[in-house]
Image (cartoon, rainbow, N blue to C red):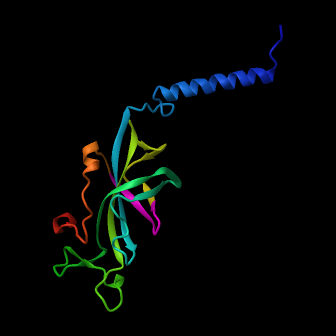
Amino acid sequence: MRRLNAFDTAVIVVGVFCAMGFGLAKAGYAGVDKIVEGKAKVGIDVYLIGLKTTDADLFTVGDKSAITIRNRPVEPPMEITKVVHWPHKASFLAQDGKSAVAFPDPTMMIEGTNTPIAHDFLITVTETAERTKDGYIVSGNKIKIGNQVELEGFKYRAQGVVVDIKEVGADAAASSGTPVKNSAPSEESEK
């Protein structure tokens, strides 16, 4: 009978640990203390402030947009399901001295026209995510409100921030609305 040397023992131990890790991952453990409770299709709202472009239709519903979270690309690219945009606004003190009013930023207009080059966008992208007690995990990246993200397409690469994450049903994703063009937020929401 042959004795095991140190190298053979190390290979066997590593193999056992790999098998245990694979078994735990299949059982639903995303990490040491993260148990996957299920999968859900989520809509991630990304807010882009003051994006400089003359093409207000840069983002199109149905297109794919690559997203980067904490300098880690998320694969596959996510589908854009909703786009809302309005001209970037500048805030000024009102005449009463107690409130603020917002107007399209005059410094961000194409010279000689009223066409803005700075826009604010609210873009919703959807993807299937794992749900844990601590939040959603998209392709191995934990995603939360406040995360800095980067959207990238054929003509753009823009940085924004996650402002909302919500579960969307299969029928809600299929009947996503068309983009709203040049719709500014209501005055009540700005107060």
Residue 145, image x, y percentages: 36, 51
163 drawn magenta = yes
Q: Which residue is drawn at 22% across and 69% down?
A: 183
Is residue 142 placed above or below 82 in the rendered structure? Answer: above
Q: Which quadrant: the N terminus?
A: top right
Q: Where are the magenta residues, as a range?
A: 151-164
Q: Is residue 168 above or below residue 124?
A: above
Q: Please state if 67 lies on the left or on the right of 111 as rendered.
A: right
99 magenta-colored: no
Residue 147 vertical placement versus 7 (above, below): below
Locate residue 88: give its quadrant. Answer: bottom left
Determine the residue positioned at 74% across, 24% down: 10
Quadrant where the C terminus sits is bottom left
**Is residue 169 in view from this perspective?**
no
Residue 34 seen in the current view? yes
Q: Along the line of sight, which residue is nearer the eye, 49 or 158?
A: 158
Residue 104 horizontal side relative to residue 152, left or right: left
Instruction: Give the farthest residue toward the bottom.
Output: 112
Horizontal and vertical percent for residue 40? 35, 39
- Residue at horizontal 37 percent and vertical 33 percent from the top: 38
56 or 45, which lies in front? 56
Residue 89, quarter of the rendered image = bottom left
Residue 108, percent across and down?
35, 82
**Residue 73: percent from left, percent from top:** 51, 53
> Quadrant location of residue 51?
bottom left
